[in-house]
Image: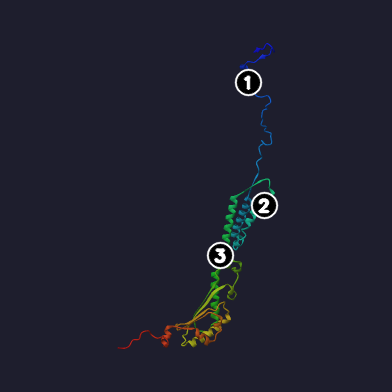
Amino acid sequence: MIFNDENQTPETSDWSRESGADTAQEEPSAQTSPQWNDFRSVNNMPKTPQKVRRVGTTTLGFTLIAVGVLMICSLLIPKFPVDMVLRFSPLILILIGGEILYNAFAHREEKLKYDFLSMFVCFLLIIGSACASIIAPTVKGMVVRDRLQYTLNNDMEEAAYNALQGEKVSSLYVNCYLIDYPWLYGTSEFADDVTWDYREMGDYMMYGDINMMLQENLETPEAFAQKVSEILQKLKPLEFPFYDIHISQRNGYFDIWIGDRWQWDAAPEDLEEYVEYSDEYRYESGDLEMEGEFSAG
């Protein structure tokens, strides 16, 4: 330190001034306050985890219980309508939707998490139930339809046999074909304990025919048409749900196909024009000429 003569004030040398400036820069300023992270601050407090509620588990539980009860009932009750119950499988979708709406309004503070596994299982149950509700009546309907056709055929053959007593008939059989909707015959309308008459099955009849062969051989088309008219008059009171009938005789000379009600009501002379002749009869009667004539040499 050097004292000045006039003011007697110490003077600081250049070296002292430089060292003091460095020291001032190294020491922290008294006005700067330390930054403390207060763990009690609201921003720094740990957040409480939000509750998570799974949606779909309850519906899956009820669905599994219902499926188990259904299987037990089908095993213990012989005629339990499984196919009818399976048609209500879309109720599972209603249960899932109700569960979602209930949790969305009753537990708004909680986070909803959809249980996709449960929903996928419910979806498979719905698809399986829908397929079963369609396949089961269809398979059952095919069996019922075949049995019903067989029964109707026998009933109509029996009715025709009784109506044609006294007629010389060699063979007679009836074919009827119901409409091809197998699932229709699997409904409760065609239950096993219901007896159907062929007169009541007209709305379900798709096609039917009667095939008959006469035991006697008539000589002329006029006589054949007269016999056909007599047979039709005996069959008309039976009220068959169709009009297709084929009548022939044993030697094959004549046969006739009738397919509408007007022909059933036609007179014998009108039926004669529908009679078909065989080539053998036409040859013997002279209506059929032989091709190629041989002359004696």
Left or right placement of residue 35 versus residue 153 in this view = right
Q: Position of residue 107 (x, y in %)?
A: 68, 47
The residue positioned 58% from the left and 81% from the top of the image is 237
Left or right placement of residue 269 versus residue 30 in this view = left
Task: Tell me which label, 2 or 3, sits earlier in the chain.
Answer: 2
What sort of colour scheme is used for the picture? Answer: rainbow
| Pointer 3 local density, CA inside 10 Å: few below 14, some 14–19, many at least 20 | some
Q: Which residue is mark 1?
A: 21
Q: Which residue is mark 2?
A: 101
What is the distance, in whole Å, between disc 1 and disc 2 at their CAs?
A: 74 Å
Amino acid beneath label 2:
Leu
Occupied quadrant, residue 196: bottom right
| Pointer 2 local density, CA inside 10 Å: few below 14, some 14–19, many at least 20 | few
Q: Nearer the viewer, residue 17 or 174?
A: 17
Task: Tell me which label, 3 or 1, sits earlier in the chain.
Answer: 1
Occupied quadrant, residue 70: bottom right
Q: Which residue is mark 3?
A: 138
Q: Is residue 167 above or below residue 70?
A: below
Amino acid beneath label 1:
Ala
What is the distance, in whole Å, between disc 2 and disc 3 at their CAs?
A: 37 Å
Q: Is residue 286 above or below residue 171?
A: below
Q: Secondary structure at mark 3?
A: helix
Amino acid beneath label 3:
Thr
What is the distance, in whole Å, between disc 3 and disc 1 at their CAs?
A: 103 Å
